[in-house]
Amino acid sequence: RAKQEGRNTYRLYSTSMDVHEHRWLAMETALRDAIDSGEGLSLHYQPLVERDSGRLASMEALARWHHPRFGPVSPGDFIPLAERSGLILPLSRRLMKMVAAQLRHWLDAGLAPVPVAVNLSARQFWQFDLIEQIRSLYQEYRLPDGLISFELTESMLLDKQQQAVQILTALRQLGCQVAMDDFGTGYSSLSYLHQLPITALKIDKSFIQQLGESQGSETILAAITGMAQGLKLTVVAEGVETDAQLDALRRYHVNLIQGYLTGRPIPAQQIAERYLINESR
Ligand code: C2E
Ligand code: CA
Ligand code: CA
Ligand code: CA
């Protein structure tokens, strides 16, 4: 009803449904403003470290939004909101630019950055000029090959594996690593996994957090890591929180660890201070 009668009339209705919708509309407007101005939007970076040496291998860029009235909004809320409201493309473009600018900043400061992984949403992955956008970003910010990498999920590729292979191949030709995120939670079609030119599997944190609690989670871990090894894929364990989990992960073919145990997502300044090597010193 509110939609039919125009936005100015929504206050006339007081059912909880309308209150709920009102909040989402207000948030959508606020998100649009944040994307336009860049205000309140930032990125945190979480380290991915080598399991055995603990050395920093790469990091994941995770979007953060702080609004003066709504406070900090979780990406678990505002990313789906952006997807529903058509804001995901401008938001993603803005975030990707922020990553590129950050990398340029670190390079200029004499730091040796590691590749930063960006989460791709489905709409972004299937955008006709994705490859062109990435290519021009590398050019504009004069970034060495491969410094931006990507994470995507299986559900994005459903029924379109042939077309997906083409996009992934183009990404690889740009020198970019590509990880399959949240692996094990989606509609895993193992039959086509070997046809996708990806470079890493990220085992979803739901499996990692059951380690030591359920025998089944270890059985699945053994199967996934065995397969990944056969396919020569880097294996990332995500959501590692305890030493017990890390110990369990040592029994399998796991290359990289990402989780609160080895490092939380933190602002760029802190990640640089704690992890990046200054080459000019
Ligand atoms: P994701 O891609 O699976 O990202 C990993 C999430 O796990 C992040 O949540 C991270 O903070 C959290 N995490 C890392 N280590 C641990 C741990 O040890 N324990 C627990 N419990 N959690 C851990 P976050 O930052 O809240 O992001 C949630 C989701 O929002 C992401 O899940 C991703 O799907 C989406 N997202 C975040 N930033 C972006 C972005 O820039 N673009 C897009 N398209 N999606 C994004
Ligand atoms: Ca991710
Ligand atoms: Ca994930
Ligand atoms: Ca996830």
Image: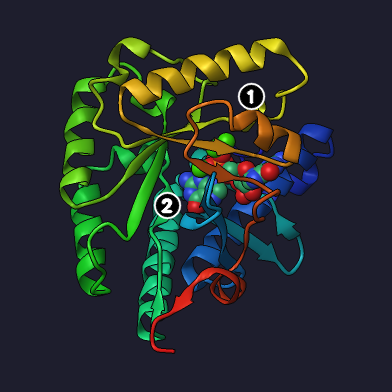
Q: Which residue is mark 2?
A: 117
Q: Is residue 128 visible?
A: yes
Image disc number at residue 207: 1
The vertical placement of 131 against 97, above or below, is above
Residue shown at 35%/76% (left/top)?
104
Residue 154: x and y in percent read: 41, 25
Q: Is mark 2 within 8 Å of ligand 2?
A: yes
In terms of image quadrants, where is residue 163? top left
Relative to the observer, which residue lies in front, 276 or 39?
Answer: 276
Q: Image quarter for residue 68? A: bottom right
- Counting from the top left corner in percent of width and height, residue 96 is at 39, 60
Is residue 6 left or right of 177 when viewed as pictured?
right
Image quarter for ligand 3 equals: top right
As drawn, 15 above or below 76: above
Residue 81 seen in the figure: no
Q: How is the image coloured?
A: rainbow
The foreground one among 237 and 148 is 237
| Rendered position, 111 above or below 71 | below
* Amino acid of disc 2: Ala
Amino acid type, residue under disc 1 in the picture: Phe
User: Which comes sooner in the sequence, label 2 or label 1?
Assistant: 2
* Secondary structure of residue under mark 1: helix
The x, y position of residue 191, in whole percent, is: 31, 10
Asked whether 9 or 164 is in front, the reply is 164
- The local crowd at label 2, few if under 14, some if 14 to 19, many if 20 or more residues have their Cα within 10 Å, is many
Seen at 45% across and 61% down, the residue is 95
